[in-house]
Amino acid sequence: DNDKTETKATDKKQAAEQVDAVTEEETVNESEDSTVTTEEAVTEAIKNSNSNNVVLSLPQTEQNVTSVQLLTNSINNVIQEDKALTIETSELEITFDNEALKSIINTSNSSKITLEVKEIEEEKLTDKQKEAIADKEITTIISAELLSENEQIKNFGDGNVTIKIPFIPKEGTEGSDYIVLYVADDGSIEEISTKFENNSFLANMCTILFEA
């Protein structure tokens, strides 16, 4: 019984140390596909930056990182340095220039911003979106959202946000054989200018469809 009590005490101590390791007031999101970045990590990334871009590389996990949370304090630290912010995971890379970061802060009423980028099934689209792509051969559907208290941030002012998503073309095809489309909730479609290199598409952040 004494051994069990000591084990529980050790477990509680370790759990407390893990919580203390997070330097923000916000708690760690327990979702397996989500990562909370701390102000300390961003500060370190700023210190290590040798250019106008702060690169924050998130740790690789067994689960795909589809949701990333940033505290507004961390974003403000990057703004003060007059730099862009790039978030890198094993599955995606997204860059907010300084003007976009300022717009995000001005738009948000929350202490944290959530970025969600994930592959979705066609069934998740709106009826108008489904109608818009009914006559097209769709390879992949990617949903990208920036959220503040579950409200989507869509306006980045004069800023620019780019997202790099890995994509492997079908056998016998090349990246240039595909186009990237933005499909709005109302079903309207707009072709997006992209760059394909190293098996990845680089495009403005939005809901995108890869069409063969």
Image (cartoon, rainbow, N blue to C red):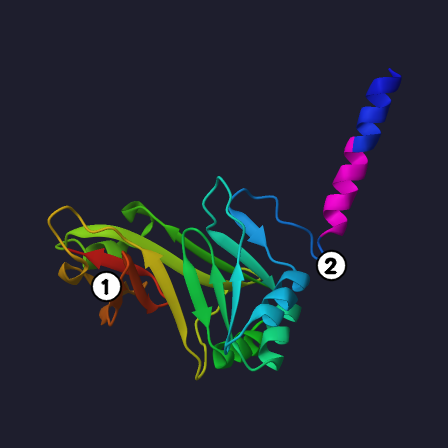
SS of the residue at dot 2? loop
Binning the other alpha carbons within 10 Å of mark 1 as few (below 14), some (14 to 19) or many (20 upward) gives many
Q: Is residue 54 left or right of residue 211?
A: right
What residue lies at 80% left-to-right and 35% top-to-bottom? 12
The one of 75 and 146 positioned closer to us in this rendering: 75
**Residue to which mark 2 is pinned:** 25
Amino acid marked by disc 2? Glu
* Viewer-side residue, 36 vs 47: 47
Callout 2 crowding tier (Cα within 10 Å): few <14, some 14–19, many ≥20: few
Residue at the extreme bottom of the image, as rendered: 158
Magenta segment, which residues?
11-21
Nearer the observer, 22 or 105: 22
User: x%, y% of residue 124?
Assistant: 34, 48
Q: Which residue is mark 1?
A: 180
Image x and y of residue 33, in percent: 50, 45
Q: Secondary structure at mark 1?
A: strand
Measured along the vertical axis of the image, is residue 158 above or below residue 13? below
Query: For the residue marked with disc 1, what is the amino acid?
Result: Val
The residue under the point 44% across, 76% down is 155
Q: Which residue is rendered at x = 17% and y = 48% of the image?
A: 170
Residue 68: tell me if it is visible: yes
As drawn, is 206 to the left or to the right of 88?
Answer: left
- Which of marks 2 and 1 precedes in the sequence? 2
Q: State the CA–CA distance, disc 1 to disc 2.
A: 39 Å
The quadrant in which residue 144 appears is: bottom left
Give the x, y percent position of residue 212. Answer: 15, 55
The answer to whether residue 111 is visible is no
Q: Residue at x 13, y 59 (%)?
A: 177
At which x and y percent is residue 98?
51, 79
